[in-house]
Image (cartoon, rainbow, N blue to C red):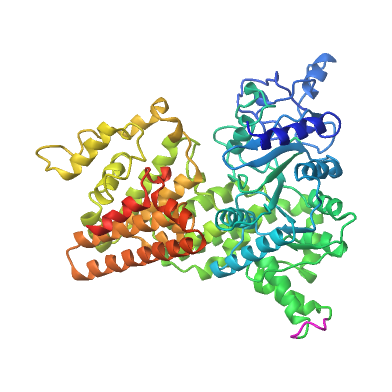
């Protein structure tokens, strides 16, 4: 283990002896079992049989007292009766990226937690704290604004020896900051390393991430590294942003919980003690309110989200052009600003009437719920119609309102909304609706949720079905050119994609859909089957049935983990193969190794141009190829300007996500 990770772990061990603790549910313990329902849930949202508490719990105490009729509580209470302090056992450093993490009690004294991070940072307090919050789920910026924003934040943090605080999840503004830091580390040689600290709840991240962190921790015994929620459970698939230097995961004892601003506010207060209080903050109303009371400067990024846009609009309306004078906004100005960005919001007299009706929920609750259900059903019909007509602007307010409800965890419709969002995203892919896809991805939709289970077979089945269903949804002309260029559809096995990739891109590209094919012998078979006549070698004689992929023991360790990056790669290749260039451009922004991805798209479109039977289609594919080739060339030029040695490395390094091909190998296809 490296010195850095040992130092971090030593600090945690020393602090945990007296001050820092973790927290877990105490309703059940590791020995608990209830009835024959193996997946029955505790109020903390864990399976009863998969609790980690080793000591006494409510169930065991009741049994010890002779209470044979004890029933578990129906609701988890955020107090000492339903949770208890336990030693910290999830902490360490993710060696691949250097991200230091710790799972800690949500009630921890923030002074002690700040002292831990401070000691790990050499004991030097930051001169500036930059909190970047807001838009965890709905966060959209233009590409130009994104670049300017992240460049300004990181330059300020570097020059001022600042710490950056975010929500720490791989979505929205946290993801943008993390990726910006990663790019800065590669392209700029600053002596100061940016400290970026993510703060979120242990129950916010998904189960796969929790298991990965437990597995990377020395303090978590292997028997406790088991899945604690049912396989069929619906999750938002949140994960931590790995480019952060520190990730602090607060635990209240329950899952499916989001962090309030209390911990961040206290952390900032502690950091600013004996320092000039300088603090830039972007985000939620709770964070803004705390910083206003703390008299800290606030920066609003107009165009980054609805809350920021509302506040920026009010600032513009209530100040003179040079900003030297300002006045309080009138009630009418506030309502107009809210109406513009939140058309469905209730306020003024409507709010009062609504509050009165809520007071009579026993009498009218069911009736109100039915009205809401009917309204949502009507909205669903409008969204389906807009998707069919490709009319995005007409349903944007509906989609934004639904996104806001999901972000606030409205449990009445949470499960239905997740299922609905998955169906809409999949339908948008099948019907070639690039604008809808762009919105969902900008709003933080995770395409991994399209699979029913978290295994490679399920993910590959999603991709296989997407190829076949999108082909069925095409018009006759589109089907015809895909048939000529890509080949026969529908596909019978995911393994056939390796044959098509080899045929269209070349033998440099290794097998990415079948572990068995990624050997010299089998890759040679694929190569020969694509380049010899069918009387010599049958192109399909070695193709296994799709069900053979279920044998997980045949998968190598490198292929046993299917991440969001693999899903974006597969969706990107699908959009190129199916000749959906607008969706390709949207997905392209989410793919890793974009230079290679651009070269691959250009190579495929050039191949399609050579196979086309009409001049119009040949010109169309050549223009598409030129567009992606130009992007790759411009990107390489920028890389050379920053660091010519690393630019050469980019061209020559193998990329596992694209079958260990290199940019140079893909570029050779252009010469043919």
Residue 371 shows up from this direction = no
Q: Is residue 6 above or below residue 222?
A: below
The image quadrant where one finds the C terminus is bottom left
Q: Quadrant of residue 177?
A: bottom right
Relative to 223, say whether 73 is above or below: below
Side (left or right) of 602 relative to 371: left
Compared with residue 660, is residue 420 higher up or lower down, i.e. above or below? below
Is residue 167 a member of the stretch shown in magenta?
no
Which residue does the image show at 66% across and 30% down from the upper left? 217
Predominant SS of the magenta segment: loop
Does the magenta portion include 325? yes
Q: Is residue 426 left or right of residue 365?
A: left
In this view, which residue lies farthest toward the left?
Answer: 535
Left-right relation of 292 to 49: right
* Residue 481: quadrant of the picture: bottom left
Q: Is residue 542 visible?
A: yes
Q: Percent position (x, y) of residue 568?
A: 45, 50
- Give residue 620's position: percent from left, percent from top: 28, 68
Q: For this rendering, which residue is in front, 651 or 361?
A: 651
Q: x, y (%) of residue 616?
A: 22, 71
Left or right? Give the position of 347 relative to 448.
right
Q: Nearer the viewer, residue 591 or 407?
A: 591
Q: Residue furthest right?
A: 274
Residue located 57% across and 61% down the image: 399
Q: Nearer the viewer, residue 440 or 419?
A: 440
Looking at the rendered image, the quarter that the N terminus falls into is: top right
Q: Position of residue 238 (x, y in %)?
A: 61, 46
Residue at the image position 29 percent from the left and 61 percent from the top: 475
Q: Which residues are magenta?
A: 321-326
Looking at the image, the residue that sits furthest to the bottom is 321
């Amino acid at each position: 283990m490296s010195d850095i990770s040992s130092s971090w772990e030593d600090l945690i061990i020393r602090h945990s002896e007296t001050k820092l603790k973790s927290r877990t549910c105490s309703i059940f313990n590791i020995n608990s079992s209830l009835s024959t329902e193996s997946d029955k849930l505790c109020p903390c949202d864990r399976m009863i049989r998969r609790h980690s508490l080793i000591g006494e719990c409510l169930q065991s105490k009741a049994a010890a007292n002779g209470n044979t009729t004890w029933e578990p509580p129906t609701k988890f209470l955020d107090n000492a009766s339903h949770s208890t302090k336990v030693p910290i056992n999830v902490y360490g450093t993710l060696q691949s990226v250097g991200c230091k993490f710790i799972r800690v009690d949500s009630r921890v004294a923030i002074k002690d937690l700040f002292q831990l991070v401070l000691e790990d940072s050499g004991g030097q307090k930051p001169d500036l704290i930059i909190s970047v919050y807001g838009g965890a789920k709905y966060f959209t910026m233009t590409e130009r604004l994104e670049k300017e924003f992240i460049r300004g934040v990181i330059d300020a943090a570097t020059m001022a020896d600042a710490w950056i605080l975010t929500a720490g999840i791989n979505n929205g503004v946290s993801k943008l900051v993390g990726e910006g830091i990663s790019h800065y580390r590669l392209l700029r040689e600053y002596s100061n390393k940016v400290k970026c600290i993510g703060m979120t709840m242990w129950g916010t991240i998904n189960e796969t991430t929790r298991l990965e962190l437990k597995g990377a921790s020395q303090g978590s015994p292997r028997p406790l590294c088991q899945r604690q929620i049912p396989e069929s459970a619906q999750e938002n698939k949140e994960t931590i942003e790995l480019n952060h230097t520190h990730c602090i995961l607060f635990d209240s004892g329950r899952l499916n919980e989001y962090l309030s601003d209390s911990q961040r506010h206290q952390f900032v207060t502690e950091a600013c003690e004996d320092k000039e209080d300088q603090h830039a903050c972007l985000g939620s109303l709770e964070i803004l309110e705390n910083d206003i009371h703390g008299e800290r400067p606030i920066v609003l990024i107009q165009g980054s989200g609805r809350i920021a846009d509302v506040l920026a609009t009010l600032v513009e309306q209530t100040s003179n052009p040079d900003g030297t004078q300002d006045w309080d906004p009138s009630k009418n100005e506030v309502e107009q600003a809210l109406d513009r960005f939140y058309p469905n919001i209730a306020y003024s007299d409507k709010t009062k009437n609504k509050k009165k009706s809520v007071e009579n929920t026993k009498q009218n609750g069911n009736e109100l719920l039915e009205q809401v259900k009917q309204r949502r059903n009507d909205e669903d019909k409008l969204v389906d119609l807009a998707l069919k007509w490709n009319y995005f602007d007409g349903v944007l307010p509906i989609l934004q309102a639904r996104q806001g409800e999901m972000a606030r965890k409205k449990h009445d419709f949470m499960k239905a909304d997740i299922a609905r969002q998955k169906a809409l995203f999949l339908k948008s892919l099948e019907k070639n609706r690039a604008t809808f896809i762009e919105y969902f991805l900008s709003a933080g939709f995770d395409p991994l949720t399209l699979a029913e289970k978290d295994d490679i077979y399920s993910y590959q089945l999603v991709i296989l079905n997407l190829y076949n269903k999108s082909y069925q949804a095409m018009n006759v002309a589109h089907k015809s050119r895909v048939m000529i260029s890509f080949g026969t559809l529908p596909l019978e096995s995911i393994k056939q994609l390796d044959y098509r990739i080899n045929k269209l891109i070349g033998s440099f590209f290794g097998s990415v859909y079948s572990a068995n094919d990624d050997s010299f012998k089998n890759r040679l078979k694929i190569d020969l089957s694509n380049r010899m006549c069918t009387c010599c070698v049958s192109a399909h004689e070695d193709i296994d049935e799709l069900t053979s992929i279920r044998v997980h023991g045949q998968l190598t360790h490198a292929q046993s983990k299917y991440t969001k990056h693999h899903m974006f790669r597969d969706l990107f290749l699908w959009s190129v193969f199916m000749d959906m260039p607008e969706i390709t451009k949207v997905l392209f922004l989410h793919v890793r190794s974009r230079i290679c991805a651009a070269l691959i798209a250009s190579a495929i479109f050039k191949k399609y141009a050579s196979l086309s039977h009409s001049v119009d289609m040949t010109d169309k594919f050549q223009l598409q190829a030129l567009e992606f080739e130009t992007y790759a060339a411009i990107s390489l030029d920028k890389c050379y300007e920053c660091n010519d040695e690393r630019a050469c490395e980019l061209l020559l390094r193998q990329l596992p996500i694209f079958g260990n091909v290199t940019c140079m190998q893909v570029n050779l296809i252009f010469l043919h």
